[in-house]
Amino acid sequence: MAAASLLFHSKVASAVDLEQIHSLAAGAFSRLSVKNEIFGKYSESIMGQRVRKVDRNLLTKKENDDLSETIKEFLALLSLYLLDEDA
């Protein structure tokens, strides 16, 4: 059975790894940061190298709550750019 994906055709999705997804996201994040420098605030907390290896199952409740709040803030800001191809 082919992998389900919102970003890729099912035949492609099964061959795409997390490194490739992060690379695509980092490029889009960089382009959005040029359009609005407030995205830079989320550079480490959302797109940083350390975050790529975070397993939320291993975080404390406070760490998870803090990360969830950061993600909510980021998504609220990102929502202003949803029709932009970089989003």
Image (cartoon, grey):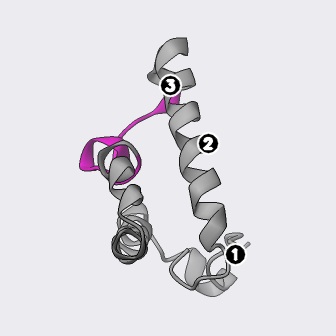
**Secondary structure of the residue carrying numbered label 1:** loop
Mark pair 1, 3: CA separation = 35 Å
Say left or right for 51 vs 2. left
Q: Which residue is mark 3?
A: 66
| Image position, residue 87 (x, y; %) | 56, 74
Residue at the disc numbered 2: 72
**Horizontal and vertical percent position of residue 2:** 70, 75
In the rendered image, residue 68, in percent from the top left (x then y), is placed at: 58, 33
Query: How many residues crowd around disc 1 within 10 Å: few (fewer than 14), some, or many (20 or more)?
Result: few
The residue tagged 1 is 2
Q: Secondary structure at mark 2?
A: helix
Q: Residue furthest top?
A: 61
Could you tell me which residue is drawn at 37 percent across and 42 percent down?
45
Q: Is residue 9 magenta?
A: no
Cβ atoms at labels 1 and 3 below 8 Å apart: no
Magenta residue span: 46-56
- Tell me the CA gap for discs 3 and 2: 10 Å
Residue flagged by tag 1: what amino acid is it?
Answer: Ala
The N terminus lies in which quarter of the figure?
Answer: bottom right
Residue at image position (58%, 77%) is 13
